[in-house]
Image (cartoon, helix red, strand yellow):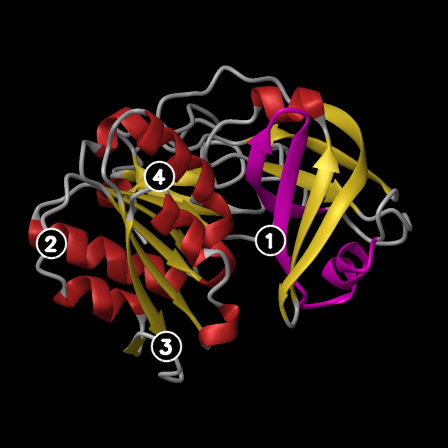
Amino acid sequence: MPALETSPAIHRTAVCDRREEAPGIVILGLEAPELARTALPGQFVMVVPPGGERAATALGVYEAEGGRVSLMLVVVGPRTRELANLATGASLDLLGPLGNGFDLAALGAAPALIAGGVGLASLLLPALALHAAGARAHLYYGARNAAALVDAERFAQLGSGVSLATDDGSRGHHGFVTELFARSGREHSGIAACGPSPMLRAVGKVALSRGIRAQLSLEETFACGVGACWGCVVPLARESAQAPHFPAPPAGDARDFVHARICKEGPVFWSHELRW
């Protein structure tokens, strides 16, 4: 992905709305006009739990319009539970926008969007931008059950085709969304995907077999979110435009990869450049 020319800042926001789309899946709407203006598709923020007793957590920017942004989160522990329980009017500090997002121009006129669970949070802004540019995207969306397939109708309203999968077979294809995509006979000009690492690896394999280039938004637990700690690295082809130029490799190092920071050089990478 090309480097995005946005500068992160601390945004002091207030919760303006809250939706619990399914048990444990919450969308928080926040008053954050500057963040809404600067956030690009695929970027994320570091969210500081208001109690101040827990570390910040990374969440993708789900919606960004007017003076409002929203964050989609799934409750998996104390940090996300504290955020999910915030009421309207509560204050929340964010650092962002962070990371490099999707190269939408490279996805072409008929891209596939592939989401696994809350990975959908990183794909609404790309879908809106692609629709505005006249592209016809198709969403492949998988979750654990029908209740966890949140907001699929929003993509359909954009004119996107939507294909669904559930682990328990309660809606759509019974199985993984990658199986659904692999069996699809649709022709696609590119792929944008976000979800768990095993899903993204499978997407990369299917993309390679079909001769399609795929952009993968990697999910990771970030310590700092700004590239300072080097705690979230992934092996990336040394010739990639996203490869960091520091630290310098040791003398005689013949490996064809370097370690890139998911939070800084990513979170979106070309699948064919990853060496995982």
Q: Nearer the viewer, residue 123 or 31?
A: 31
Residue for badge 4: 269
Does 126 sit above or below residue 181? above
Three-letter code, disc 3? Arg
Q: Is residue 174 visible?
A: yes
Q: Nearer the viewer, residue 156 or 238?
A: 156
Q: Are marks 2 and 4 in contact (CB under 8 Å)?
A: no
Q: CA distance from mark 3 to mark 2?
A: 21 Å
Q: Amino acid at mark 2?
A: Arg
Residue that numbered label 1 is attached to: 221
What span is colored magenta in the figure?
57-86
Above or below: residue 242 compared with residue 115: above
Which residue is more in the foreground, 136 or 182? 136
Q: Amino acid at mark 1?
A: Thr
Q: Residue at x 50, y 15 (%)?
A: 5
Which mark is nearer the camera, 3 or 1?
Answer: 3
Q: Which mark is residue 171?
A: 3
Nearer the camera: disc 4 or disc 3: 3
Q: Amino acid at mark 4?
A: Phe
At x 43% / y 37%, what residue is drawn? 260
Q: Earlier in the sequence, mark 4 or mark 3?
A: 3
